[in-house]
Image (tube, grey):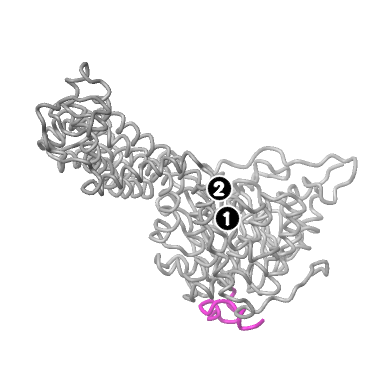
Amino acid sequence: MSNRVEVRPAPAMATGVDTAQVAALSRGYWSTVAGRLGTDYVTIACGLVLIAIVSAAIFADLIAPADPYKTSIVRRLKPIGFANHPLGTDELGRDMLTRLIYGGRLSLFMGVLPVVNALIVGGILGMIAGFLGGRVNMAIMRVMDVFYAFPSVLLAIAISGALGAGVTNAIVSLTVVFIPPITRVTESVTTQVRNLDYVEAARASGAGTQTILRVHVLSNVLGPIFIYSTSLISVSIILASGLSFLGLGTEPPEPEWGLMLNTLRQSIYINPWVAALPGAVIFATSLCFNLLSDGLRTAMDVRL
Amino acid sequence: MTTETAPHAATARATANEPLVRVEDLRVTFTSRDATVNAVNGVNFTLDQGEVLCILGESGSGKSVTLRALMRLLPPRRSRLGGKVMIGGRDVMAMNDDQLADLRGADVAMIFQEPMTAFDPVYTIGQQITETITRHDGVSQSAARARALELLELVQIPSPERRLKSYPHEMSGGMRQRAMIALALSCRPSLLLADEPTTALDATVQIQILLLLRKLRRELGMAVLFVTHDVGVAVEIADRIAVMYAGRFVETGPVATLIREPEHPYTRGLLSSTVHGAMRGRRLEAIGGSPPNLTALPPGCSFAPRCRYAEPACDAAVPAEVWINPQHMARCIRVAPGQAASGGFTLRKP
């Protein structure tokens, strides 16, 4: 061997390093993310708006100015700014502000729950299909293709219609609508990740299939499908509102944004600003979910 | 050698006269709907503890496949393995998945060609090294992290504390390859498989990595199986060189012998086609033709179609291994055992 090599003594293998010091150094990912979010004012604003909407829905009993079910024949279809009714009244004289606050409960619930359900089912199906490949992939993905044959709104209406009106059935039908796209996204990301060098490197350092799936595939797949799912929440809110609008979701007199939009439809020539309010809230909520998911993706990407 | 750096207990069981690695008639075929590719066609070799064997060959000669077959990393559905692989006295071909997972990383570790993609981008270097250590050694998180720090020092990464919590994309290619080596060494393997670890690096970093590997090999006493297509790299690192062509070792021997007295026409062609030691003003010689189609290998010597010394007998059957001396083997019918054929034909015609 040549003496050009600078030979340093091999460090002792089990001594000489303060383990606590090392432990402290491995923190810092979440503080980095927080630091990045701190400078992203759009994301902060969207987060604040969503927090306001969600907490208003949760604490509706405490903050709502009136009873959401109390009707009044004399005070029907009052405009925005009417005394005691800052956002006016609907076609039965109920306070709009109150009903919008209460409406957030069902609308957000029906927006988030189907996506969470579909994320779990579709994520598992997609990872199985992508990782195993071959016939399993073929079987799962062709079944998903069948669902793709129907437009999503039509599919939701068909399933809801078959199951009957009601919140539970609406959630089931929306879950079925969201499983195929989430499965497909998960499958394609998993197929990419499976063939990357670091999966083979993990196998070469003794990782079993389960460990590879849990540690390396899941962590690389979860980011993209999580971001994709947040963007589906807004679609889900709109679809849920649509189902209610058609009378397949919530039933009157429950306050729900889509249903409110439906019932106020007839008064759009009398009082257009009030009639547009539920739509504006749906729009604002969807937009905030989309912008928030974009902001989170940027902040949480370690490669940027 | 201290007890700390001793090879893994399992491989230490191997008796003194049994080599660390013994490969007999290794065959790998890849099957698809359209074709069957014969990637490795009967490879035999042994590797002693602490020895460095370099597999030299051009693209598609089966070097990397041979390496992966030793660890059984090839996709089981699309590949068929044949022959015998013994590592540390244990039959790798007979192992089940759990035994394989215990072998990989602990007794046999691998470094990859592309340090850019061989690390998981969402975990820090420290996390990935500690993951491997805790899996195989069963030590606590903090002990594993301390060991990861020592490993980064061992592979001479500057400011290792900071690098432990770096993500792979935050490091340069050479740094990442050092980290890759640290990861491979994390459980003190007795055999290191290196799949062209310097190919993706630039020339100055290349030599640093080679020097590091040489130093580590000496300090830790592990055997290295090094795959490369670069003769210069092979000479720099190897004790022995095996020249691979169309899935067979066509010539093996100690570095000095192989470089000075190559017997197989392919080895000669390979050596004369590199700039190492070439004369100024003289054209480099290239080997005419291209490697054979691995889906339909000729029945005889697979180099015969390109060989300037080929004769009808070459096409009759695959030449047997001829041992010129106990260390030097060539698969060529023109080579006789115990005697070099160099006098019989000269490489460079006037």
Q: Is residue A44 left or right of residue B143?
A: left
Mark 2 nearby-residue class (10 Å; few <14, some 14–19, many ≥20): few
Q: Is residue B342 magenta?
A: no
| Coordinates of residue A166 in the picture (x, y in percent) | 12, 39
Residue A169 placed where, x, y %? 15, 40
Element assignment for label 1: loop
Above-or-below relation of A12 to A186: below
What residue appears at the point 18 percent right and 20 percent down from the top-left corner?
A: A267
Q: Around disc 1, counting alpha carbons within 10 Å, would you say few (fewer than 14), some (14 to 19), or many (20 or more)?
A: many
Q: Amino acid at mark 1?
A: Tyr
- The kind of residue tagged 2 is Arg
Q: Is residue B327 above or below residue B38?
A: below
Query: Which residue ends up furthest to the front in the rendered image?
Result: A83
Q: Main secondary structure of the magenta part?
A: loop
Between A275 and B265, the one nearer to me in the picture: A275
Compared across the picture, whether B264 is left or right of B37 comes to right
Image height of A130 relative to A17, above or below: above
What residue would you read off at disc 1? B167
Q: Which residue is mark 2?
A: A303
Quarter of the picture holding the C terminus of chain A: top right
Q: Image check: A174 left or right of B105?
A: left
Quadrant of the image occupied by residue B148: bottom right
Residue B19 in percent (x, y) is at: 59, 74
A159 up-or-down from B116: above or below: above
| Disc 1 chain ID | B
Magenta segment range? B1-20
Report the side of B87 relative to B333 (left or right): left
- Of B97 and A224, nearer the camera is A224
> Is label 1 in contact with label 2 (beta carbons under 8 Å)?
yes
